[in-house]
Image (cartoon, grey):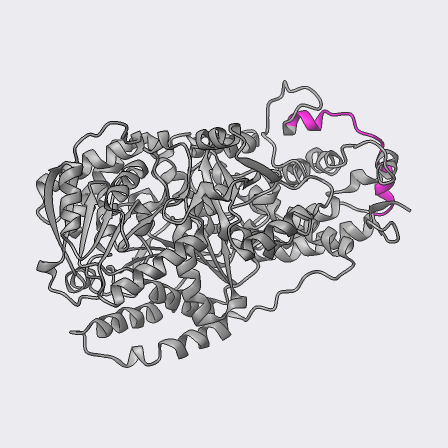
Amino acid sequence: MHFAHISEDKKREQTIREHLEGTGKLAQKFAKEFGCGDWGYGIGLLHDIGKYSEKFQKRLKGGPITDHASAGAKELFHQKNYPGAYCIAGHHSGLLDGGGLADSGGEATLMGRMKKDLEDYNPWKEEVKIPAFSPPPLRQLGKGGFSLSFFIRMLFSCLVDADYLDTEAFMSGKEERMGNADSIDVLYASLKKYVGKWMETVDESTVNGRRSMILKSCFEKGREDKGVFQLTVPTGGGKTLSSLAFALEHGKRHQMRRIIYVIPYTSIIEQNAQVFREVLGEKNVLEDHSNYHCDSPEELRLSQLASENWERPVVVTTNVQFFESLFSNKSSKCRKLHNIANSILIFDEAQMLPVNFLKPCIQSISELVYNYRCTAVICTATQPSIKKFFPKEIKIKEICPDTRGQYEFFKRTEFKNKGEMSEEELIHELREEKQVLCILNSRRQVQRVYDRLKGESTFHLSTLMYPEHRKRILDKIRRCLAEDKPCCVIATSLVEAGVDLDFAKVYRELAGIDSVIQAAGRCNREGKRKKETSPTNVFTLEKSEGIHLPSALKQPIAIASQIREKYEDIGSLEAVEEYFRRLFDVKGESLDTKNIIGQMEAGVKDFLFPFATVSKEFSIIEDNTTTIFINKEERADFIEKHIRSGKISRQLMREAGHYCVNIYDKDFEALNGSGRLEEIVPNLYSLRNKEEYTEDMGLSVNVSRGEAVFF
C-alpha cells in the first residue's frame, strides 16, 4: 500500500489514492463554477502520482526530499495537456515559467522539469487512470494568450486549494471545513430590512431623498444581466450601501456566490467592513488586508493556517492583495482565485487602480467577467476615463441615475486656489481655524507641521500607527467634531477615502485631481453649512529643505496644475474627465509598464508563459515592506505570546494585523541594524523598545524617506 501522508502522532495514514480522490473531488467542485469540473477532477487525481515512487515512501519515514510534483505533469505534458502540466508541476513550488526548448533537465521551468529524470513511480497505473478532459468553455479576448494563461491560473487555484484542504482535513483528523455563513438570499433580506425606512423617503430635494433615489436605482439595475457596470455616486450619496444593494440584488437574481470589495487603502478597510458587519452580521464578512503572508512548502505547517481562500460571502480586500494575487505564481496567494468565479466585484475608488498596471488590471477584470461568470462594478465619485481600455466585447452600463444632477446636488464645498504658500503661512492659517483638516503629500512635512501645531486639539494621522491605534484617534476626532470642539488634523492621504469626517474647512496640498476631490469629500460632508463658507483650499508649498516628492507624484501634480489653470471648478465632471485623459495619454505604454499583457499574449504560440517572471514584475507597491508588530496593548501581548509559542491560526494572524505597521526597506534596515527589532517568526518582527512607538507619532523611524507616499 502506498501512502501520501502520515499524521504527526504517527497513528494515522492516508493512502495516495484517498488523497488523490479527495483532492480531485474538491478541485472538481471549485472548477465547476467556471464550467471546468472535469479539469479540476483530472488534475487533482494526477497531482501526486509521483508519491508512488519508493523514494517518496521512504521520505515519509524521514528519508531525503524527492520531487513528486513532476510526475503527473509529465503524464499530461505527453498528452499535450499543457494547462494541466503547468498546474501539477507548480502545485508546491508555484507556477513555473514555460522556459524554452534548450532548457536542461531539472531547470526551474516547465520545459526543464519535463526533461528531468524521475524516480520510478509506475505503481500509479494500478490505481489511477487518466480521465478525459473536455475542451474548456473559454472565449478568447485579444490574441488569446492572456486568456489561456488566466485559465491556467484559475485551474491552478482549484488544485492548490483542494490539496491544502484535503491535507489539512487529514492532518487535523477532521472533515473538510464547512463555513457557517449565510446565503446571498439571507443577506439580501438583511439589507432590505436595514434600508427599509430610508427607502420610504421620496422627496428628492433632501439628502435622504436623493440617497433613496440612488439606492432604488441600484436595486433595479441589479436585476440586469451580468457584465461591467459603472456606479458614479458623489461623496455623500451613500455609495457604500448603494453598491451593496446592487450586488445583493444581482447576486440573488443570478445565484452568485459572493461579493468582493476591492479598496485601495489598507488603512480604511476596517470602516467599510464594519458597515457590512452591522448590516449583514459578523460571520458573513471577511477583511483580508494581509499584513502577514507566508508561502507554504510541501509539508503542512501551522503557518498555512494563516492563509485565506476567501470562503465568506462578503470579502473586503485591497487593490494590492486582489491584483497581485491574480498575477502571482505563488500557491499561497493563488489558492483563493477560484473563489472569485461567479462573484460580484466592487472596485471602490476605482480612480486609484494602479496606473502603471492599469491595462493588465482591466484585462484581468475583463477575463473574470467574460469567462468566469463575474460582474464588475467600477465604483467612484470621480470616474476615470477607463472605458476605452476595456476590450470591445465588454460594454459598460451606468447604474446611478442623472449623474450630473447628483453631482450638483451633493456639492458641499467650493475649491479655492490659494497658490503657493510657505510652511509659516500654512501654520498661521491653520491656527486661525476651529475645525480644519490639512492633507500634505509628504509624511515628513506632516510631522513637521504637526510638531509646530501640537496641542490638545491637534491630531496626527499616519500609516506608522497600527490600525487599532488609528481607530482610537479617529474616534477622538469624531467626538471633537460632533461636540463642536476645536479640532485640527494633520495627515497624509490616508484620510481621503472611506473615512467619514466632516470638517468646516479643508486644506489640500496640490496632488492628482482625484486626490484633491477625495479630500474635498471631508469638507462639509453632511451639508450643514453653506458651501461658500466651507472651502477646500488647494495650495502648493514652497520647497523646503529635506522634503522631496517621489516621481510617481510629479506627473499627476503637473497635470493637475494644468487643469487648475483651465477650470475654475477643478472638481467638475469635465475637469475630472480631462485630467484622467491627459494622465493616461502621458502615461501611454507605461499603463502596462512591464508589458504584462504582451508577455502573456506571446505565450499562445508555443504554450510557454512567463508565470514566475510576471509574478516578480507585477508589484503595485514597488518598495518592499516589512511588517512590525507593536506590542503596547493587552490584546497585542496575548497575540504575540501565542505566535511565539507556535499557536498560530487564521483568526490569530488576521487579528495580529490590527497591531502591525508596514515599513519600507530603508527604514527597516535602520531599525533592525540598530538592534531595535526582533524577528518573532519569518518576516514578522516585534519592536524591542516600546518607547520607540508614541501615542502622537506612532512608530519612530529614520524619516529620511519622508517623501514616500503611503496608501
Q: Nearer the viewer, residue 17 or 38?
A: 17
Which residue sits at x=62%, y=65%? 179
State the quadrant of the C terminus. Answer: top left
Residue 398 placement: quadrant? bottom left
Q: Position of residue 42 (x, y in %)?
A: 70, 48
Residue 622 placement: quadrant? top left
In this picture, is 374 found above or below 60?
below
Which residue sits at x=78%, y=51%? 19
In the shown orientation, is residue 449 left or right of residue 698?
Answer: left
Q: Nearer the viewer, residue 665 or 638?
A: 638
Q: Nearer the viewer, residue 530 or 692?
A: 692
Residue 121 included in the magenta stretch of the image: yes
Residue 628 included in the magenta stretch of the image: no
Q: Position of residue 71 (x, y in %)?
A: 76, 35
Q: Position of residue 352 (x, y in %)?
A: 33, 46
The answer to whether one can see residue 253 in this image is no
The number of numbered discs placed on residues in the rendered structure image is: 0
Q: Nearer the viewer, residue 472 or 321?
A: 472
The answer to whether one can see residue 413 in this image is yes
In the shown orientation, is residue 151 left or right of residue 459?
Answer: right
Q: Position of residue 565 (x, y in %)?
A: 9, 39
Which range is magenta?
111-127
In this picture, is 678 found above or below 24?
above
In this picture, is 410 found above or below 15?
below
